[in-house]
Image: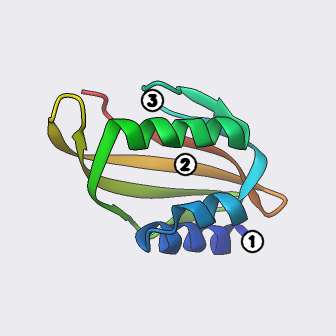
Amino acid sequence: MKTEEIANNLVTWFNNNEEARCYQELYSPNIVSVEATGEYPTAKGMEEIAKKGEWWNETFEVHSSNASQPIVADNWFSVRFDMDTTHKESGQRSQMSEIGVYQVKDGKIVKEQFFYDSE
């Protein structure tokens, strides 16, 4: 799969609540995921990605989320994500935006990194 097709599939599937499909079909088994903050600042491989996802789902209730159209440049693409969430423990509701930057090699996403304000 070419980078543009991967980027478009990620956005479409995310916006259709099919995130699991993204991990199954678009990601390399050796994926590296880098967060700005959080319980899992760097996750390597699908097992750690799954643990990061479990932590997210245990920690936040997602009221809504949306991914923008991707911007593609060679083997890279970026997407803006907007989310409305509630932190389950504190009950604090907030809206945030983040930029995800993805690297593609051999038809799979090999790295993702997220940029957002942590305060």
Q: Position of residue 56 (x, y in %)?
A: 42, 39
Taking depth in this image into account, of 31 and 115 the one nearest to the observer is 31
Left or right for 79, reference 50:
left
SS at badge 3: loop
Residue holding disc 2 = 101
SS at badge 1: loop
> Above or below — where is 12 with respect to 104?
below
Identify the mark nearer the N-term, 3 or 2. Answer: 3
CA gap between label 2 and label 1 equals 16 Å
Name the residue rendered at 24%, 47% in the picture: 85
Name the residue rendered at 61%, 51% in the picture: 102
Taking depth in this image into account, of 81 and 39 the one nearest to the observer is 39
Q: Quadrant of the N terminus?
A: bottom right
Circle nearer the viewer, 3 or 2? 3
Q: Which mark is residue 36?
A: 3
Residue holding disc 1 = 2
Identify the mark nearer the N-term, 2 or 1. Answer: 1
> Above or below — where is 76 with respect to 57?
below
Q: Position of residue 80 (x, y in %)?
A: 39, 56
Left or right for 47, reference 51:
right
